[in-house]
């Protein structure tokens, strides 16, 4: 039976933690071990984690006295991992039923694949979400080369359900540790590094459930250019380091940053017609810096890649 090590970083998410751990331990088809790392929570999360470890021998807990941050927790989990496969799951998220069996059905038969990712659904705080069991045998998937994956994760798409990514542990250790300077997009940058070590499987099935609430890490980003700036930083880091070795690195880099600039352009227009002039100005500056020609020729080609672009623009004008 395949073995999977799962690290669960936790900071003040103790009220979500039992449900998260249950969704991991309930997975079939693998020998699972879980490491909860509590980052000096002040809400009793450490006590919850210790209780879960006492109740199940497959769960280990490390409770820190000092908050060293999310990236340090993930990196500690990478160093701890010894199973064939590795996964990071946030303490406020859940795995969908059958997540491991679907991913393993691909990974076990295709040794050249470095990691499998799938789709995710969003849960608004504690609102219940039902995820139907999806048979591994009927889950469709496709192979991506490194360059294809890069374009897959840059705007306008950019969301790949990174909370339920199954990685070969050997590849994870070869790729190294997460970069602390990328607090909000460290997972995106790591996946791009991992993609260079083999091929990527895009699984057309729901693999995870992501909670959205007021304490989510991304909620600390301002609404203007902040989220796009963090995405830009991830790509800057990647292309300045490992990504520079890609045969088509320069062309990919130009395409990625043009897409980010085009995204900033249309977001700036949306914020402007919505009356959020401060946000709009920040985004205009970003668009001018990354895609200067968009100041003279609106990037209409970008809209062809966006789902229901006219409806979204129409909604912005109506607001």
Image (cartoon, rainbow, N blue to C red):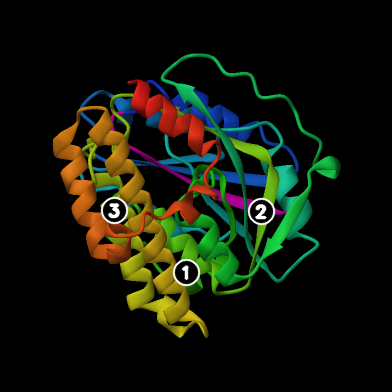
| Residue in view at x 51 percent, y 64 percent | 150
Circle 2 — which element? strand
- Does residue 4 belong to the magenta stretch? yes
Q: CA distance from mark 2 to mark 3?
A: 24 Å
* Side of 94 relative to 201 (left or right): left
* Numbered range of the magenta stretch: 1-12
* Quadrant of the rendered image containing residue 292: bottom left
Circle 3 — which element? helix
Q: Which residue is mark 2?
A: 202
**Of 81 and 274, the residue lying toward us:** 274
**Of 69 and 60, the residue lying toward us:** 69
Q: Residues within 10 Å of mark 2 (few under 14, many from 20)?
A: many
Residue 210 pos. (x, y %): 48, 32
- Does residue 90 belong to the magenta stretch? no
Query: Is the stretch drawn in magenta largely helix, strand or loop?
Result: strand
* Quadrant of the rendered image containing residue 197: bottom right
**Of 14 and 59, the residue lying toward us:** 14
Q: Which residue is mark 3?
A: 230
Compared to 132, does 180 lie above or below?
below
First reached walking from the N terminus: tag 1 or tag 2: 1
Residue 12 pos. (x, y %): 28, 29
| Residue in view at x 29 percent, y 24 percent | 214
């Amino acid at each position: 039976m395949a073995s999977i090590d799962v690290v669960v970083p936790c900071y003040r998410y103790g009220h979500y933690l039992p449900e998260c751990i249950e969704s991991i331990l309930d997975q079939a088809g693998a020998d699972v071990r879980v490491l909860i790392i509590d980052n000096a929570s002040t809400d009793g999360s450490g006590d919850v984690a210790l209780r879960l470890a006492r109740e199940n021998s497959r769960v280990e807990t490390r409770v820190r006295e000092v908050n060293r941050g999310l990236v340090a927790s993930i990196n500690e989990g990478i160093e701890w991992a010894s199973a064939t496969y590795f996964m990071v799951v946030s303490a406020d998220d859940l795995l969908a039923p059958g997540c491991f069996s679907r991913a393993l059905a691909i990974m076990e038969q295709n040794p050249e694949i470095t990691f499998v990712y799938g789709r995710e659904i969003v849960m608004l705080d504690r609102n219940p979400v039902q995820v139907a069991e999806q048979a591994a045998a009927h889950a469709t998937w496709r192979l991506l080369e490194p360059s294809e994956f890069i374009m897959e994760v840059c705007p306008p798409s950019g969301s790949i359900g990174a909370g339920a990514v199954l990685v070969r542990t050997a590849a994870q250790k070869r790729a190294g540790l997460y970069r602390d300077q990328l607090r909000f997009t460290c997972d995106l940058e790591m996946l791009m590094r991992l993609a260079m070590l083999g091929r990527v499987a895009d699984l057309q099935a729901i693999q995870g459930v992501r909670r959205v609430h007021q304490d989510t890490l991304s909620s600390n980003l301002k609404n203007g250019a902040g989220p796009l700036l963090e995405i830009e930083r991830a790509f800057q880091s990647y292309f300045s380091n490992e990504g520079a070795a890609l045969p088509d690195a320069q062309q990919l880099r130009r395409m990625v940053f043009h897409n980010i600039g085009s995204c900033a352009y249309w977001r700036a227009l949306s914020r402007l017609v919505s009356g959020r002039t401060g946000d709009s100005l920040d985004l205009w500056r970003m668009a001018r810096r990354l895609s200067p020609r968009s100041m003279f020729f609106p990037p209409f080609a970008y809209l062809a890649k966006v789902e229901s672009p006219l409806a979204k623009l129409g909604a912005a004008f109506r607001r």
